[in-house]
Amino acid sequence: MKTILENISEKLKKAFVECGYDEKYGIAVISNRPDLCQFQCNGAMAAAKQYKKAPIAIAQEVWDKIKDDPYFKQIDAAAPGFLNMSVSDKALAGYVAMMGSEKDFGFEPGNTGKTVVIDYGGANVAKPLHVGHLRPAIIGESLKRIFATDGFKTIGDAHLGDWGLPIGLIITEMTRRNPELPYFDPDYTGEYPAECPVSISDLEEIYPFASARSKEDDEYRQAAKQAVVDLQSGRRGYIALWKQIMEISKIDLKKNYDGLNVSFELWNGESDADPLIMPMIEDMKSKGITRISEGALVVDVKEESDNKEMPPCILLKSDGAAIYASTDLATLVQRERDFHPDKIVYVVDKRQGLHFEQVFRTARKAGIVRPETDLIFLGNGTINDKFGHPFKTRDGGVMRLEMLMKDVADKVYEKMSDREMDKDEILKISKMVGLAAVKYGDLSNQATKDYNFDIDRFSSFEGNTGPYILYTMVRIRSIVEKCGQKVGAGSLSEAFSEDSLNALYSGRDVSDSERELMLGLTGFSQALRLASDELAPHKLCTFIYELSNRFNSFYHENKIISEENVSLKKAWINLILLTYGVLDKVMELLAITVPEKM
Ligand code: ARG
């Protein structure tokens, strides 16, 4: 279904052509003077240059061609050459009614048949999720859903850090504590125990302990590094232990991501790319793009146009070990082999920007990805505390995700404690609302910008917050149910037949708030298009915040439940059902669950 802007542009184009001008000037945009009109066209100003005429003269000629089109309620040519337009209430209502009967409210997918891989996990095995993992997970999950609605086949990869120092530290500490375990005996040839000798809560104690010790004790740190080397070169006992730790870690991580309503199609880890590293490097060598620099094997990636420092990409350190970049390159080999993606998006902390620039350039140079494959680094900004300082716990430690979520849910619980519901229900709902507060607080900010996590503001039921949107949705549900209907059920367009459109929207004095709500709804496709093309879920947040405001004004100014004109009441219920549907679709795209009451 065409967007309303496309519908208007079509009319404008025709008029421009009829006046002898290029159709490219007939483009409608949202008005930047909503006090004057709903839409505008600035084409006459641009056309004036080409045709060497006064812009207002062109605007007037075009105006003359469309001034009688009943699609418009008002259309003016205004100095210096604008066309200001508002569509008729009937046209607006007709458009909105159509939205209600179309899949995804008439949004046209633009990427059908294409494949995208999204890398938005990056959690490190054996280390609990902390606040730094929140943004990639939340943004990545939303992008994946947006892309899927836009036609892409989507593959989310957790890309676990399962192969590095953390695991070496754990092996070292466990060897110290339980030297008798068979995993640590290099001469052992029998079967290893069936079960992992440590639990997740053991790991939660062992890892920070070992990590702290390695910072003070050089020998200990060397031992941990050696354990990594031994593990990576296949030492049997270490591999067996590592596999068992991986298994329990994955279960725990999955639980954590589930709690955030985040999921992955692939649970690959860095280790999965490991077997591909050496053949890939051999290939690069044979292509002659590598060189030795201070004992390390590198690829030069500097380009003439660079105005910032661009060090070579290191493939192998001087001790022969592969590193982070080699792993990411081999992962690209793997993704190209398995999925042939058209686009690969990394949602990772923006401080890793240089690393990805080096990796992307090397991948292009080595022909690892096809030239037309889009490689995108969406570097996310940092979450700071309410004062803009790094996010820490009260005692200065790393803020664990679980703690953060609990704090927010407690806050919401406090606010809801006066509700007439049983305690368990309030508890359940406050968890949901708390999660919405956190996710919306994050997603409503541009992904690349830092933001301050302000628990009071995020959990407020008013303003541009998750709870406000949920509250609006719960309100719609309750009105609809009071009118004997259900949200999400049946076709929404039935009350808007041509006859009822005429009856309801041609003669009646439609209130501003009703018109504004309809106008708001027409912006859905445009908002989703921008969110997908620009990797910008925050545009959807802005859209639903404005839509919620429009709904609430409409609700305050019109008595829906007690309206006596039966067909008008039906039309209004349809309008708010559609509002609910659109809000619900966007919340699904943001991966936020909506409670039935709150
Ligand atoms: N595990 C990494 C870290 O904690 C993040 C991984 C991001 N993804 C990637 N493909 N490099 O820094």
Image: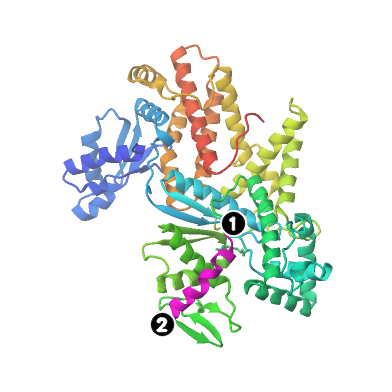
Ligand 1 is found in the corner quadrant, namely bottom right
Alpha carbon distance from label 2 to label 1:
34 Å
Q: Which residue is mark 1?
A: 121
Magenta highlight: main SS? helix
Q: Residues within 10 Å of mark 1 (few under 14, many from 20)?
A: many
**As drawn, is 412 to the left or to the right of 268?**
right
Q: Which residues are magenta?
A: 268-288
Which residue is nearer to you in this view: 454 or 423? Answer: 423
Which residue occupies the extreme front position in the image? 190
Q: Give the mark nearest the N terminus, 2 or 1.
A: 1
Say which of marks 2 and 1 sits in front: 2
Q: Residue drawn 55% across and 44% down?
A: 590
Can residue 279 be found in the magenta stretch? yes
Mark 2 C-beta to ligand 1 under 8 Å:
no
Q: Amino acid type of disc 1? A: Gly
Q: Quadrant of the C terminus?
A: top right
Mark 1 C-beta to ligand 1 under 8 Å:
yes
Residue 96 in view in this figure: yes
Can residue 183 be found in the magenta stretch? no
Residue 130 in view in this figure: no
Q: Return the x and y of residue 474 as percentages of the image width and height.
A: 60, 29
> Which quadrant of the view contains residue 348?
bottom right
Q: Residues within 10 Å of mark 2 (few under 14, many from 20)?
A: few
Q: Which residue is mark 2?
A: 288
Relative to 21, residue 324 above or below: below
Relative to 372, residue 402 above or below: above
Q: Secondary structure at mark 2?
A: loop
Relative to 477, residue 288 above or below: below
Q: Return the x and y of residue 592 as percentages of the image width and height.
A: 59, 41
Relative to 285, residue 152 above or below: above
Question: What label does residue 434 carry, if any?
Answer: none
